[in-house]
Image: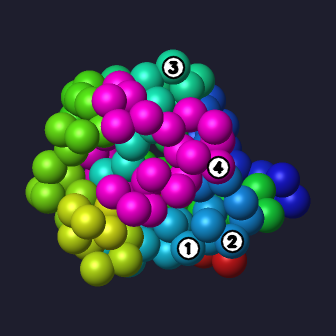
Amino acid sequence: MSKPVPEHYRHLRTFTFGDSPALADELLKLVVTGVKTATCSTEDEPNTSRPGERWVVLDGRGDPRCVIETVEVSYRRFHDVDAAFACDEGEGDRSLDYWRNAHRNYFGRLGRFSEDMMLMCERFRLIEVFGD
């Protein structure tokens, strides 16, 4: 991390979206522009969250770029994710078909995909964006 986390957020956990610097930056851009207000992960990942928890989101270089706050967490199977959640994830054309294909690929790259895998589905709100 070349830039420090602002002093009043240093107590928060940090994380990066996606599994590559390019994907981290792409998804971060969707967050800071207000398009992406949800995310999901496997239920056993260390980034599990709870409502009210705040996170510092890092870009693909590991620099802090914004703070988000979890507003809702639910657990559901991959095949039970609905179109509203897919739209809130904000990726591609925001359709359920796009979401399913993108997440099959993503979880497949991680070696963790199955149609009935349990996901932690999280909605969040943007708290602050950090300048360059």
Please tell me whether residue 44 belongs to the stretch shown in magenta. no
Q: Which mark is residue 97?
A: none
The residue singled out by tag 4 in the image is 109
Hey, which quadrant is residue 71 in on the image? top left
Could you give the CA–CA distance between mark 3 and mark 4, rounded to whole angstroms?
Answer: 17 Å
Q: Which residues are magenta?
A: 100-127
Q: Which mark is residue 22?
A: 2
Which label lies toward us, 3 or 1?
3
Q: Upstream in the sequence, badge 4 or badge 1?
A: 1
Report the residue at 62% width, 63% height from top: 24
| Amino acid type assigned to the residue bearing label 3 in the image | Asp
Report the residue at 87% width, 59% height from top: 2
Q: Upstream in the sequence, badge 3 or badge 4?
A: 3
Which label lies toward us, 4 or 1?
4
The residue closer to the viewer here, 59 or 98, is 98
Q: Upstream in the sequence, badge 3 or badge 1?
A: 1
Contact (CB < 8 A) between labels 2 and 4?
Answer: no
Please tell me whether residue 126 belongs to the stretch shown in magenta. yes
* Left or right of 102, for residue 124: left
Could you give the CA–CA distance between mark 3 and mark 1, rounded to whole angstroms?
Answer: 24 Å
The residue singled out by tag 3 in the image is 44
Q: Would you call the spot at circle 2 few (<14 residues within 10 Å), some (14-19), or many (20 or more)? A: some
Contact (CB < 8 A) between labels 2 and 3?
Answer: no
| Amino acid type assigned to the residue bearing label 2 in the image | Ala
Provide the secondary structure element on which disc 4 rests.
helix
Q: Residue furthest right?
A: 2
| Amino acid type assigned to the residue bearing label 1 in the image | Glu
Provide the secondary structure element on which disc 1 rests.
helix
Report the residue at 24% width, 40% height from top: 79
